[in-house]
Amino acid sequence: EALDELATRAGLPVGRPPRPGWWPAAVLAQASMTILQVVGGLWLVGQIIGFMAPNLGVPVLLMVAGIIGGPLVEWSCRLAARGPARRYGLDAERRLREAAAGCGRARVLDPLAAELLRYREVREQYGRVTGAGIGAG
């Protein structure tokens, strides 16, 4: 129970990890890819219903750019976030290990060391008592 309590306190820092500086640019790029797809689709619909002159090249190119660009932006963001995420995870693991070691020391090792010290003192006293009794007899 004590370890669970320490894990909840020491596991993760308060709040969310900070967003990297490139995050707004990535959001803008992803939104641009979506807008390209929507504009291309509306352009094609306008051509189908006869509102615009038929020309498949530009709207299809816009849609393809958005369809291909969206996953490319996502892939590049994943690559860019991998290093900081790894560092954040390693830091959280280090904090958890330190908390577990401290809990183990306080709950197991320190009481065990105190008990072994008392045991050694009793053995020394027993040796003195029995050694004195044998020598006198």
Image (cartoon, rainbow, N blue to C red):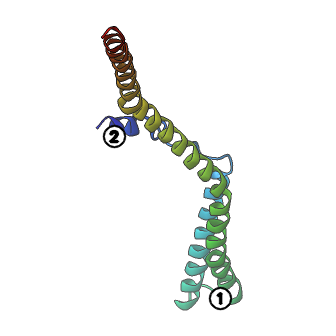
Q: Does residue 14 show up?
A: no
Q: Quadrant of residue 46?
A: bottom right
The residue carrying mark 1 is 53
**Residue at the farthest front position:** 137
**Residue at the farthest top position:** 136
Residue at mark 2 to residue at mark 1: CA–CA distance? 67 Å
Helix, strand or loop under label 1: loop
Drawn side of residue 101 relative to residue 91, left or right? left
Q: How many marks can you see?
A: 2
Above or below for 105 versus 127: below
Drawn side of residue 107 relative to residue 40, left or right? left
The tag on residue 4 is 2
- The front one of 127 and 58 is 127
Residue in the image at 59% along x and 68% along y:
35
Above or below for 125 versus 37: above
Q: Amino acid at mark 1?
A: Ala
Q: Are marks 2 and 1 in contact (CB under 8 Å)?
A: no
Residue 70, image x and y in percent? 62, 71
Residue 111, image x and y in percent? 36, 26
Q: Quadrant of residue 94?
A: top right
- The front one of 44 and 18 is 18
Residue in the image at 39% along x and 17% along y:
124
